[in-house]
């Protein structure tokens, strides 16, 4: 009763199921690895934020990429702002994650002549995106900045396209190597996301601390994919049994109909046999006999 599995329809259905199972398992592991990455990143952020502040030069150096282990570390930098080489970073959101504006990026010249980029915070974009916005003035004189150490942004890591031909002093990515070409002095790799001191006014709006509590839905997605993978063979078995049951039922019904038809034919044959065993009366015999009884003999010819 399982020969139907060799039909075209069932062969295709079985092959599709065999392909879906490993694909779903792989998707489940992909989500699981994303969950592990998120958990590890949250732990790194928490450790970095809880660590004591260190001088920025102990973590960063000109032309050197910031190691991942040093991301979000609290650093201190003392120097004077180089506002002549200040730029704004386009298409950045405020703390409400809805308002679009700019990050203000200003080089801070350190005592040894090197400089580090400082993200002083967020400002509104305004109405005219073709000109340099009104940026709150950076503090004058020597200042000590506290902030989170961040790695240079790249298109591959951030997903932000590094658009060319932007208005003057506007950029898409925060990248120390690119800005070093403009500033004309060595820039430490990465940049500082300022956390203090707070600006005198309400702007620039300091970038909030990164979320390191939520882990996202990746683990739930992984379990869902694995359940889907397990459901494929279960569903296949259910469909096979249902098909077999339907075929058995259909075969039994067909056999019953054939039996009833055979019994009906046998009944008709038996009736015909009974009718054939009794002599048939000639047609019109009754009328002849009746006519004979009532007939008057014809007179004899003299």
Image: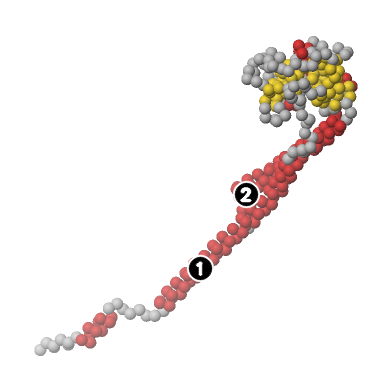
Judging by the rendered image, the residue that carries numbered circle 1 is 260
- Residue drawn 56% across and 60% down? 250
The answer to which image quadrant residue 186 occupies is top right
Instruction: Tell me residue 62's x, y (percent).
Output: 84, 17
Q: Residue at x 28, y 80 (%)?
A: 285
**Cα distance, mark 1 to mark 2?**
33 Å
Classify 264 as above or below 129: below
- In which quadrant is the N terminus drawn? bottom right
Query: Measured from the top left, where is residue 230 in percent x and y?
Result: 72, 48
Q: Is residue 33 visible in the rendered structure shown here?
A: no
Q: As drawn, is 263 to the left or to the right of 244? A: left
Which one is nearer the viewer's eye here, 186 or 32?
Answer: 186
**Crowd band around label 2 with a 10 angstrom C-alpha radius: few (<14), some (14–19), many (20+):** some
Name the residue rendered at 70%, 25% in the picture. 92
Picture coordinates of residue 135, whole percent (x, y): 72, 17
Left or right? Give the position of 128 relative to 137: left
Tag 1: Cα neighbours inside 10 Å, few (<14), some, or many (≥20)? few
Disc 2 designates what residue?
Answer: 10
Number of marks drawn: 2
Q: Are marks 1 and 2 in contact (CB under 8 Å)?
A: no
Judging from the image, what secondary structure is the residue with disc 2 in? helix
Residue 166 seen in this snapshot: yes
Q: Residue at x 43, y 75 (%)?
A: 271
- In the picture as drawn, the residue positioned furthest to the left comes out as 302
Residue 89 occupies quadrant: top right
Q: Is residue 294 above or below residue 284?
A: below
Q: Please, is residue 113 above or below residue 101 in the view? A: above
Secondary element at tag 1 = helix
Give x and y (percent) for residue 240.
64, 54
For the C terminus, the quadrant is bottom left
């Amino acid at each position: 009763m399982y020969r139907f599995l060799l039909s075209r329809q069932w062969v295709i259905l079985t092959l599709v199921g065999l392909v879906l199972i490993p694909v779903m398992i792989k998707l489940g592991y992909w989500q699981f690895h994303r969950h592990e990455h998120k958990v590890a990143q949250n732990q790194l952020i928490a450790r970095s934020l809880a660590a004591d502040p260190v001088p920025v030069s102990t973590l960063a150096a000109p032309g050197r990429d910031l190691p991942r282990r040093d991301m979000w570390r609290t650093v201190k930098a003392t120097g004077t702002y180089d506002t002549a080489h200040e730029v704004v970073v386009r298409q950045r959101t405020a703390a409400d994650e809805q308002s679009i504006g700019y990050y203000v990026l200003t080089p801070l010249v350190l005592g040894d002549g090197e400089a580090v980029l400082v993200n002083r915070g967020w400002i509104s974009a305004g109405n005219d995106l073709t000109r340099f916005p009104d940026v709150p003035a950076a503090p004058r004189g020597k200042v000590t900045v506290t902030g989170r150490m961040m790695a240079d942004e790249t298109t591959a890591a951030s997903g932000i396209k590094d658009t060319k031909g932007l208005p003057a002093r506007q950029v898409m990515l925060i990248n120390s190597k690119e800005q070093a070409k403009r500033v004309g002095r060595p820039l430490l790799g990465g940049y500082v996301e300022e956390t203090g001191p707070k600006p005198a006014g309400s702007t620039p709006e300091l970038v909030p601390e990164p979320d390191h509590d939520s882990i996202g839905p990746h683990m739930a997605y992984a379990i869902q994919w694995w359940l889907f993978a397990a459901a494929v063979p279960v569903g296949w078995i259910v469909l096979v049994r249902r098909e077999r049951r339907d075929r058995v039922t259909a075969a039994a019904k067909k056999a019953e109909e054939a039996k009833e038809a055979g019994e009906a034919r046998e009944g008709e044959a038996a009736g015909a046999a009974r009718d054939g065993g009794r002599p048939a009366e000639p047609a019109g015999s009754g009328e002849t006999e009746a006519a004979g009884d009532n007939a008057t003999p014809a007179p004899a010819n003299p």
